Image (spheres, helix red, strand yellow):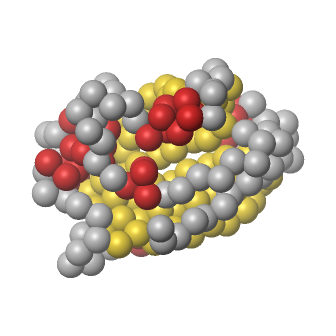
Amino acid sequence: MSGDAWISETAPYLAPREQGKPDAWTEEAARRGRSGGQTLLQVGEVSAPALVRAALNLGPDDQVVVRSRLILLDGHPVEIARSYYPVAVARGTRLADPRKIPGGAVSLLRDLGFSSGSVLEDVSAGLADPEEREHLALPEGSAVLRLLRTTTTAEGVPFEASWMTMPADRHLTYRLGK
């Protein structure tokens, strides 16, 4: 989003989509006269990174299903979004299928009985690692913002951890309430 002041609200990304509606990112970009899209980079079972294990209350050997996507704006990469799910939630579902999910993951999760009770977002900054530099077309020494979003049920059970990486010149504004 280089140089763009982009005020984004989290709520649309956490709400199930109506059938036939585009995903939240595509819809948000279109409202601004832009083209939003995404490329699926990886889907499958992996060892959970430490921060994901902690967010999802998993043990050191627990596997997760990851859905990693490159988020595009007008055809240019602006974010890497990785969503992690405990295998007990995702194994054998469309979350583990390396294709786009009709209606999006939030709608599928709702259909599987997992609705958002609370969301915790943690933002940090650091230097981009080689994979982040490659996917986001950043030069060596570039800084990135990283946002870890953990979604839990009303009972406090975590079922999704999303790790988003974006260039540091991205402007994040959070709007809460109505």
Q: Position of residue 155 (x, y in %)?
A: 21, 78
Q: Which residue does the image show at 66% across and 61% down from the upper left?
A: 173
Residue 172, placed above or below residue 6: below
Q: Which residue does the image show at 48% across and 34% down from the upper left?
A: 27
> Is residue 105 visible in this depiction of the protein?
yes
Q: Which residue does the image show at 53% across and 56% down from the upper left?
A: 9
Question: Which residue is situated farthest in the top direction here?
Answer: 75
Residue 16, placed above or below residue 39: below
Q: Which residue does the image show at 55% across and 30% down from the upper left?
A: 30
Q: Position of residue 36 (x, y in %)?
A: 56, 29
* Nearest to the observer: residue 129 or residue 97: 97
Label count reads 0
* Nearest to the observer: residue 127 or residue 170: 170
Horizontally, residue 53 falls left or right of residue 73, namely left
Query: Which quadrant is the N terminus positioned in?
Result: top right
Q: Quadrant of residue 130?
A: top right
Q: Position of residue 68 (x, y in %)?
A: 45, 39
> Is residue 62 visible in this depiction of the protein?
no
* Nearest to the observer: residue 58 or residue 149: 149
Q: Position of residue 118 (x, y in %)?
A: 35, 72
Question: Which residue is situated farthest in the bottom direction here?
Answer: 155
Horizontally, residue 120 falls left or right of residue 132, namely left
